[in-house]
Image (cartoon, rainbow, N blue to C red):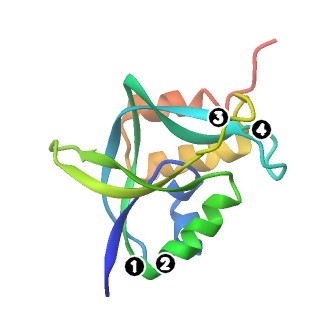
Amino acid sequence: MQTTLYFAYAALLSPRRILDVVPEAQFRFIAHLPETRLVFPHLNGRWDGGLPSVKPEPGNTVWGAVFEIPVRALASLDETEKSEGRERSEAFKAVDREGHRHPVVTHIHKGAPNGEYTPCRDYMRLVVDGGRHWKLPTGWVAGLEEYIEEPSL
C-alpha cells in the first residue's frame, strides 16, 4: 500500500476526527512548519467564526501532528478540508523534533481571504484537544487555548 505523510494542524489534529476521515491514519511524530503563521481567513457558514489556515511568514511557526496515510485516502481528506475552505498543498516540509525535514501533504486556504476573522471557539477546542493529546509544545497549546477563552468585557 502506497502511503504519504499528512500534516494536521486544524480540527483533524483531533484523534477522533482524523480517524473518522481516515481510519487507517497512523500517528508518526509531531513537527512544525517553519516560517508559517496560523491565520483565520475563511468563514464557511457551518462554524461560528473563522477557520484556520497557514500562510508563509518569516519568524513564525505552526505546530501539528504528522500521520502516515494511504495515498488512496487523500480524496477523503481533500473533501473534508475543502468543506472548511482549504485545498491540498504539497509545498511544505515539516520539521520534526530532531530537525529532520519531511515532505508532507497539508491543506491551506489558497484563495483570497474573505477577511481575517475571530476564530471559532468550538472549532478551536478540537484543535486544542488534539494538541494536548499529541503533546505538542506547551507554549503552542497555550497559545491555541487563548482562542477558546471567553472574551473579557
Tell me which numbered mark, 2 or 4, is placed earlier along the sequence: 4
At x 46% / y 46%, what residue is drawn? Answer: 132
Q: Are marks 1 and 2 in contact (CB under 8 Å)?
A: yes
Upstream in sequence: badge 3 or badge 4: 3
For image coordinates 28% across by 56% down, the residue present is 103
Q: Given the image, on which type of amino acid does mark 1 rest?
A: Pro
Quadrant that contains the N terminus: bottom left
Numbered tag placed on residue 73 in the rendering: 2
Q: Is the residue marked by circle 2 packed among few (<14), some (14-19), or many (20+) residues within 10 Å?
A: some
C-alpha distance separating marks 4 and 1: 32 Å
- Residue 70 - label: 1
In this rendering, position of residue 50 left or right of residue 27: right
Q: Which mark is residue 40?
A: 3
Q: Amino acid at mark 2?
A: Ala
Q: Residue at x 69, y 34 (%)?
A: 119
Task: Find numbered disc 3 in the image and state the secondary structure of the residue it sits on.
Answer: strand
Which label number is shown at residue 49? 4
Q: Is residue 57 above or below residue 81?
A: above
Q: Amino acid at mark 4?
A: Gly
Mark 2 or mark 3, which has the lower sequence index?
A: 3
Q: Which residue occupies the foreground of this view, 27 or 44?
A: 44
